[in-house]
Amino acid sequence: MKYWNPEIETMSRDALTALQSERLQKALRHAYENCKPYRAKMESAGLQPGDIKSVEELWKLPMTVKNDLRDTYPYGMFAVPMKDVVRIHASSGTTGKQTVVGYTAGDIAIWGECMARCLIMAGANSEDILHVSYGYGLFTGGLGGHIGGETIGAATIPASTGNTKRQLQMFTDFGSTVLLCTPSYAMHLGDAVHEAGIRDQIKLRVGVFGAEPWTEEMRDEIENRLGIRAHDIYGLSEVMGPGVSCDCEQRNGLHVMEDHFLVEIIDPATGKPVPDGTPGELVFTCVTKEALPLIRYNTRDICTIDRSPCACGRNLTRMGKITGRTDDMLIIRGVNVFPSQVESVLLGIAGVAPYYRLVVDRVNNLDTLEIQVEMTEGLFSDEERRIESLVRRIEKEVLSALGISAKVTMVSHGTIERFEGKAKRVLDRR
Ligand code: DLL
């Protein structure tokens, strides 16, 4: 099966725009009538729902940010009575209050539809044994992956995260063919498969990884370790969870499920839309959501968009790989640094394992960046000269790619923390 929903996925731009505009008007009316914070926002902008007739006028609407959801914690932005809410999730929220999100039965059905499109896009099908190693719980990864697997008719294994030894046993005993987890856990599982010497006993062929930024270099590393084809899936709890977009066989950007989520890119400094192809903050408007309407929600994720048709036959707009979040951007001695830039440099160098940590500090009023990198297993610590030259090479390449100097420390294999969910690779001590 090439497409889950060919009618939508290959719809002409004109037809899609008409559908989006019609749904947008309905979504605005729903938010205005049933959600006080949206009514207040629109009134203070001097807008009535009927003033916006098409997607071209989206920019006129006020933006929504994470704090709007936090300030109304837990249910203040829900637009349906609790009797119609059938599911609750919450964002991981490392800082501040969690963001609580709700779903009606209709919202869950759309989630299943979007996830099914993504899995088919990534090459999964009803004959697959789909192993979900995203966490099950308030995090949307586990249950989001699960509903997608069941919707396409795959044999779905709710493995959840952790207990790596047992995951490997399931790979071999249950014959898992599709793996869903974070890229950092996929990397860790790949190493564990290698260490256990069971690579020839596993049947994995496709990976659908997301929930955190990862580079093309990381994609290559994971594919080599597990012998699979790895796809990138994107989403966020506020919008729905995983399944907002995913990359197809072309792997040239992630197709956004635009019949449900309108996508814009804005300049973080001015809040104004930027031309297609220019990086900026990703903003979504959900046009079909019932329980938690979301209008012009600023994700703070940074990427570009490309509206040209794709060689896969889909007309759905593609977003580029997320390079970072505006709130994850490190400013080191005045220079903007995204951890993904460091990852790209490191993984392009032989002898470096895909495990690293960035330690940022301030010494005598000066910012310092230390990059702790694991050596590959083959590189023994007694080969001092080789390690020294590797350190110099990384320092030189980081300087040329980032424009700032960093101290590189090589650490032995297995010393940097492994992650089963989203990785935490930055320690900012400032
Ligand atoms: O991470 C939903 C998800 C689960 C997506 C499983 C994909 C797979 P949250 O916990 O709300 O939801 O975190 C959302 O994670 O704003 C991005 O910063 C980041 N993120 C998600 N997918 C990707 C990706 C889930 N493919 C936040 N690439 C988002 C880069 C991603 N970052």
Image (cartoon, grey):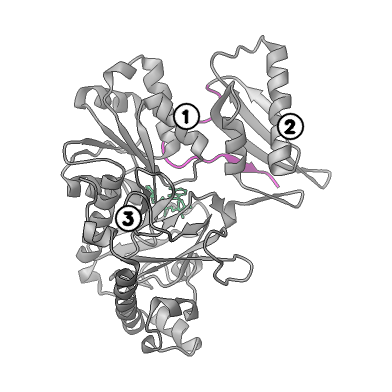
Q: Is residue 429 left or right of residue 351?
A: right
Residue 219 coordinates in the image, percent (x, y)? 45, 35
Amino acid type for the residue under numbered disc 3: Arg
Pair 3/1: label in front: 3
Q: Nearer the viewer, mark 3 or mark 2?
A: 3
The numbered mark, 3 or 1, whose residue comes first in the sequence reads 1
Nearer-N-terminus badge (3/2): 3
Q: Badges 3 and 2: C-beta atoms under 8 Å apart?
A: no
Crowding at dot 3, Cα within 10 Å, few <14 / some 14-19 / many 20+, comes out as many
Q: Residues within 10 Å of mark 2 (few under 14, many from 20)?
A: some
Q: Nearer the viewer, residue 94 or 319?
A: 319
Where residue 141 appears, as percent x and y from the top left, is: 34, 47
Do the residues bearing badges 3 and 1 touch, measured as CB atoms within 8 Å? no
Q: Disc 2 to disc 1, how far (Cα)?
A: 23 Å
Asked whether disc 2 touches disc 1, contact meaning CB atoms under 8 Å apart, the reply is no
| Left or right position of 206 against 83 | right
- In what element is the residue under mark 3? loop
- Mark 3 highlights which residue? 314
**CA gap, disc 3 to disc 1?**
28 Å
Quickly name the residue at label 1.
221
Percent x, y for residue 117?
A: 26, 52
Using the rendered view, name the quadrant where residue 28 is placed: bottom left
Q: Main secondary structure of the magenta part?
A: loop
Q: Residue at x 71, y 47 (%)?
A: 430
**Residue 396, label in figure:** 2
SS state under label 2: helix
Name above or below for residue 274 compared with residue 34.
above
Type of amino acid at the residue the image marks with label 1: Glu
**Between 29 and 98, which is closer to the camera in this rendering?**
29
Magenta extent: 414-430
